[in-house]
Amino acid sequence: NPITSLEGLPSKLKYLNCSTTHITTFNGLPEGLEYLKSDSCHSLKAIDISSNYITNIISSYCDNIKEITRLPSSLRNLDVSWCLSLRNVQYFPSNLRSFKCGECVIRELPLLPDTLTKLHVYITHLEKLDYIPKALVYLSLEVCFLTKLPELHEGLRYIVVRTNYLDTANIVI
């Protein structure tokens, strides 16, 4: 029988790779879990995690995730690449440092936290980005529907903005 639940995991578990399982929610995660990898979990419809210890979430190739409703306040790195149905991210935790998403239908991102140092968004429907945090050093926006960028700052060290609809006269550093 395929694994459909994460209930009953050891309470001291720190690392969990539940990729290619048939889980439908993240209910039952141990409170001390720090790293969660759930690639190719095609039964997942949302990321809704209340645990406050997880620092890394990689949920790539989860075709049916439509939204991210709740994330741990401890989260530092989030990768939701190739989540083809992802439409909505309600918010980012204030400690997030890296966000990667691609091949999804997100049109707008919530306010980026001031701690964000890496933003990699590719092949999305992203139309609007209002703010670039001062901590950001890596910015990659590839194959999006952006027509303008917010004001960029001197701290950026890596910028890719290829295949957008940008008016390059509006890029200000």
Image (cartoon, grey):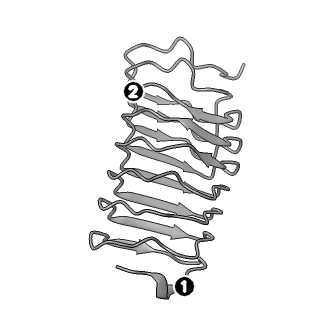
Q: Earlier in the sequence, mark 2 or mark 1?
A: 2
Q: Which residue is mark 1?
A: 167
At mark 2, the secondary structure is loop
Which residue is located at x 40 percent, y 51 percent?
Answer: 98
Where residue 33 appears, x then y in whole percent? 40, 25
Residue 62 lies in what quarter of the image?
top right
Crowd class of label 2 (few under 14; some 14 to 19; many from 20; radius 10 Å): some
Horizontal side of 24 relative to 12 (left or right) equals right
- Quadrant of the snapshot with the C terminus: bottom left
- Residue 7 drawn above or below residue 22: above
Residue beneath disc 2: 52
What's under tag 2, amino acid-wise?
Asn
What residue is drawn where x is 31% and y is 71%? 153
Q: Position of residue 39 (x, y in %)?
A: 58, 41
93, 124: nearer the viewer:
93
* Residue type of the residue flagged with mark 1: Asp
